[in-house]
Image (cartoon, rainbow, N blue to C red):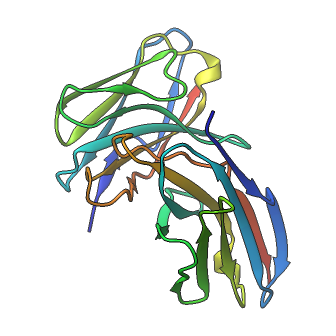
C-alpha cells in the first residue's frame, strides 16, 4: 500500500527562523514529487522534483529529493508571517493518469 | 492564467438531498479531480477523470458519483447527502503527460444538516 508521511504535523516558529519540513514516501513506480502551499484557500504549486540531489530554489524556499532514502525536504529560511500555511507533499506514480498522492500536510505557523 | 472555478463557495444542504458540485476549467486540461479535505486527514481523492465520459475511482468514492460530459466541466454528485459528507470539496485539473502539476479551484465548503 502506498504511504506518504509528512513531519512534523505542525510547527510554530518566530519570524526569521529557518524551518525544515519532511516528506517520506513509499510509492510504487515513483516518478516525481510535488510540493504545494495551502493558505486559507486552494493549494498552490511550489516545486516538482524528479531527480535525486538536485536542489530547487525559489526565493527563500528550497527543496531536495532523495530517491534512495525515499524522502524529500522543504526548507524555508528567514521565515515571514506570510509563510504561515499548510505545506503538502504529493508523490506522483507513473501510469496513474496524472493522479497525485497527497500527504496530510504540515501546518506551519510563523509568529511576528 | 489557469482558472479553475467551482459553482459555490459555501453550500448548506439537508440530509437526503441530492447535491451537485460543479467545476469548470479554462485551460483545455485532460485531467480533472475531485478531493475532499478534512482537518487532520489531508486531501483525499474521491474521483478523477482523464477524458470526457471517462472516470476513475479514487480512495473514497462511496456515496459520490461524477459526470464529465464536456472536457472543461466535471461534476461531483452526492446522491443522498449525509452529515458525514460535511467537508471542504476541492476540484483540480491538469494536463496529461506534460506536467503533473494540478491547478486547484477555490473550494466549496459543504455543510449537511
Q: Where is residue A68 in the image (x, y as percent from the top left)?
A: 64, 63
Residue at the spot 44% in from the left edge and 52% down from the top edge: B106
The quadrant the C terminus of chain A occupies is bottom right
Residue at the spot 24% in from the left edge and 27% down from the top edge: B54
Location of residue A88 with respect to B108 vertically, above or below: below
Note whether residue B113 is visible: no
Q: Position of residue A97 (x, y in %)?
A: 33, 41
Q: Position of residue B13 (x, y in %)?
A: 51, 22
The quadrant the N terminus of chain A occupies is top right
| Left or right position of B3 against B43 | left
Q: Position of residue B9 (x, y in %)?
A: 45, 44
Residue at the spot 58% in from the left edge and 15% down from the top edge: B82
Residue that extends furthest to the front in the rendered view of this protein: A68
| Left or right position of B49 against A74 | left
Location of residue A1 with respect to A7 vertically, above or below: above
Location of residue B103 with respect to B6 vertically, above or below: below
* B67 vs B58, nearest the viewer: B58
Note whether residue A59 is visible: yes
Location of residue A33 with respect to A56 vertically, above or below: above
| Left or right position of B51 against B103 | left
* A46 vs B88, nearest the viewer: A46
Residue at the spot 65% in from the left edge and 51% down from the top edge: A25
| Left or right position of A22 against B60 | right
Which of the 4 image quarters holds residue A107?
bottom right
Amino acid at each position: 500500500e502506498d504511504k506518504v508521511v509528512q513531519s512534523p504535523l505542525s510547527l510554530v516558529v518566530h519570524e526569521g527562523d529557518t524551518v525544515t519540513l519532511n516528506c517520506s514516501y513509499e510509492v510504487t513506480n515513483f516518478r516525481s514529487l510535488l510540493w504545494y502551499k495551502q493558505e486559507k484557500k486552494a493549494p498552490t504549486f511550489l516545486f516538482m522534483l524528479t531527480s535525486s540531489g538536485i536542489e530547487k530554489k525559489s526565493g527563500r524556499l528550497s527543496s531536495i529529493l532523495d530517491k534512495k532514502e525515499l524522502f524529500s525536504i522543504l526548507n524555508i529560511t528567514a521565515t515571514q508571517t506570510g509563510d504561515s500555511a499548510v505545506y503538502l507533499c504529493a508523490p506522483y506514480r507513473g501510469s496513474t493518469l496524472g493522479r497525485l498522492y497527497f500527504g496530510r500536510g504540515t501546518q506551519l505557523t510563523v509568529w511576528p | 492564467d489557469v482558472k479553475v472555478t467551482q459553482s459555490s463557495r459555501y453550500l448548506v444542504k439537508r440530509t437526503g438531498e441530492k447535491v451537485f458540485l460543479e467545476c469548470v476549467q479554462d485551460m483545455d486540461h485532460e485531467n480533472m479531480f475531485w478531493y475532499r479535505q478534512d482537518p487532520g486527514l489531508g486531501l483525499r481523492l474521491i474521483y478523477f477523470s482523464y477524458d470526457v465520459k471517462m472516470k476513475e475511482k479514487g480512495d473514497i468514492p462511496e456515496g459520490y458519483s461524477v459526470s464529465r460530459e464536456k472536457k472543461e466541466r466535471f461534476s461531483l454528485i452526492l446522491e443522498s447527502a449525509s452529515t458525514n459528507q460535511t467537508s471542504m470539496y476541492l476540484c483540480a485539473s491538469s494536463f496529461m503527460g506534460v506536467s503533473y502539476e494540478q491547478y486547484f479551484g477555490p473550494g466549496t465548503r459543504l455543510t449537511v444538516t
